[in-house]
Amino acid sequence: MGKITIAIDGFSSTGKSTIAKQLAKALDYVYVDTGAMYRAVTLFAMRQGFIGGETEDLEGLGNALSGLDLKFVYNKSLGFSEMYLNGENVEKEIRTLPVSQQVSKIATIEKVRVKLVAMQQDMGKKKGVVMDGRDIGTVVFPDAEFKIFMTASPETRASRRYKELLDRGEKVAYEDVLKNVQTRDYIDSHREFSPLRKAEDAIEFDNSDMGLKEQLERIYNFALRKIEGH
């Protein structure tokens, strides 16, 4: 049975990465978390002082990208790959609220998107890949055999994200998380380069009132039909 490319797009905190990770494991496919790549670039920009201070130097960030090394390294004990930035494991740091508050801005930069899209396309050349993000089905893999667009209400997504941050020991307010979700929605949908939008041939999947088990079962069955028909 031939392998296909699976593109999962959608709004922030819809559980794209969780579902994509589980689906890849169930199908024995490679999982690529493109959001982690943008978060790693954001962390790099914050550390280097390109953003987050009194002034911003987005042009300087664009020029510094040639010295950026991003890699996914599989962690056998966890059962998934973690993001490494210039040889350092930054998986936990890139998931914090300060990074979340800046990542949509970084994702609007054309040089950043061009570099990461090229890396993502290279990762998926051999198919048998599940990739999630904002523009996978529209820009990275417009010819993907199976596309899903995940959505849920902003309040539902903020609640999920809030719980996730609390579980990690972060001190955050729900109102700040909701504002972050709404701000990211607007920026992601209105940016000039590769805006977040549903591909015409994508299945819209609203998981507002759905648990992880039901989501995985439904999407897994969708995927099997696509693979069998390929």
Image: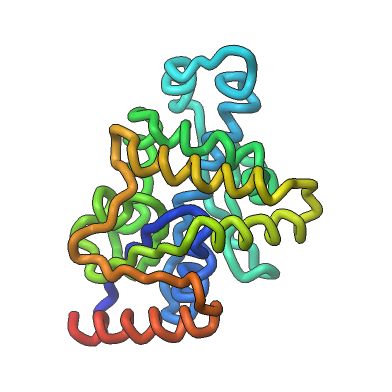
Residue 55 picture quarter = top right
Instruction: Residue 142: tell me if it is visible.
Output: yes
- Does 2 sit left or right of 167 as displayed? left
Can you say whether 106 is above or below 7 in the image?
A: above
Question: In the depicted view, which residue is nearer to us: 170 or 190?
Answer: 190
Quarter of the figure with residue 125: bottom left
Q: Where residue 44 sits: x, y (%)?
A: 58, 31
Residue 37 at x, y percent in the picture: 49, 45
- Number of numbered discs present? 0
Looking at the rendered image, the quarter that the N terminus falls into is bottom left
Residue name at image x 44 percent, y 46 percent = 185
Q: In this view, does 99 lie above or below 91?
A: above
Q: In this view, does 170 lie to the left or right of 131?
A: right
Pinpoint residue 157: horizontal percent, then vertical percent.
55, 59
Q: Which residue is drawn at 57% across and 43% down?
A: 180
Please indicate, yes or no, whether residue 90 appears anywhere in the rendered image. no
Which colour style is shown?
A: rainbow
Q: Which image quarter is the C terminus in?
A: bottom left
Q: Which of 94 and 213 is in front in this view?
A: 213
The residue that appears at 45% across and 86% down in the rendered structure is 217
Front one among 214 and 135: 214
- In the displayed structure, does residue 155 sit left or right of residue 168? left
Residue at image point 64% right, 18% down: 53
